Amino acid sequence: MTGIPASIDATQALLAGADYVADRGLAATIFLALKMQRPLFLEGEAGVGKTEIAKVLATSLGRPLIRLQCYEGLDIHSAVYEWNVQRQMIEIRLAEAEGRKSSEGLGQDIYSERFLIRRPLLKALQASATGAPPVLLIDELDRTDEPFEAYLLEVLSDFQVTIPELGTIRAAQPPIVIITSNRTREIHDAVKRRCLYYWVDYPDAARELEILRRKAPEASATLTREVVAFVQRLRQADLFKLPGVAETIDWTRALLALDALALDPQTINDTLGVLLKYQDDIARVQGSEAARILQEVRARVAQAA
């Protein structure tokens, strides 16, 4: 297990050691969240690397990663705990058959921890009792309903949950909490107030170039520069869904699978489905528009060289 980094520079180096290229503002926010033991709320477009931060921190710090993938209709039973009803029913029938316990004693027994099924939030709070606090990733919180946000307030402010039959369960040490949102809806201010906040934006060309050099080192220098310039140009276009860093990496790997050493109009048209995820966007870029953007890209790359 690695200790918490001692400075912003050390945090940036920790992330870089796992091939995550972070700007100083992001590294500073992560450092403060770790230092102050506060949840970190990361907001931004899909594919810009929010979820990856939790994975990198877990790997780099030697902590287990506990992930709660959010979705519409997520409730306490799926996120925190539920009772093992089948085991409880078996216990009741056995006790009745053997006449072992009174109804009051049986009620206390079947609502003990051995009948408790722990879900991600409860696992994260109890994990620190037996080892280092884990990294708890609450991914895509904007997909959940507002009542679940309200329940989260107790977890985020006091690192505890209340189970009526057992009482309040507190974390021996707070987990490292990373919350992500793609901003498909606004998250309540009460949740954000309990966190440190950072907007993860699309990287500039220099940072995206460094990301590709780390994630797809086998790509030629020409291909890497052209891919980054092409994607950066697409992000200026009026598209329904702009390509994220994840799409840039996937596209580069797809081009490598085709043994491409540089971009050409035909290869771009053949692989746009890796980069863009909506047919209207593909139709807008495909053909003459892709060729025109490629000409711009080549001119820009040649000028920079």
Image (cartoon, rainbow, N blue to C red):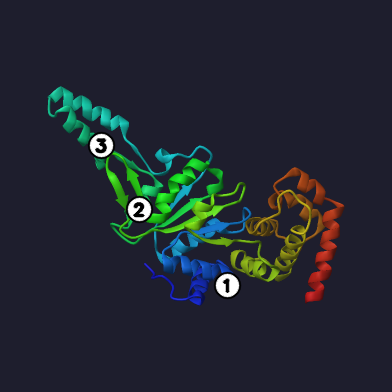
- Marks 1 and 3 sit apart, C-alpha to C-alpha, by 49 Å
Do tag 1 and tag 3 residues touch (Cβ < 8 Å)?
no
Q: On the picture, is 86 further left or further right than 276?
A: left
Neighbour tally class for label 1: few under 14, some 14-19, many 20 plus, Cα within 10 Å: few
* Above or below 48: residue 83: above
Q: What amino acid is at disc 1?
A: Arg
- Marks 1 and 2 sit apart, C-alpha to C-alpha, by 30 Å
Q: Which residue is mark 2?
A: 125
The numbered mark at residue 189 is none
Q: Secondary structure at mark 1?
A: helix
Q: Secondary structure at mark 3?
A: loop
Q: Residue furthest top?
A: 97
Quadrant location, the N terminus: bottom left
Point out residue 42 in the picture as x, y percentages from the top left corner.
55, 58
Do tag 2 and tag 3 residues touch (Cβ < 8 Å)?
no
The numbered mark at residue 24 is 1
Quadrant location, the C terminus: bottom right
Q: What amino acid is at disc 2?
A: Leu
Q: Which of the two discs, 1 and 3, labels the residue nearer the N terminus?
A: 1
Q: What amino acid is at disc 3?
A: Tyr
Q: Secondary structure at mark 2?
A: helix
Q: Which of the two discs, 2 and 3, labels the residue nearer the N terminus?
A: 3
Q: Which of the two discs, 1 and 2, labels the residue nearer the N terminus?
A: 1
Q: Which residue is mark 3?
A: 111
* Above or below 301: residue 284: above
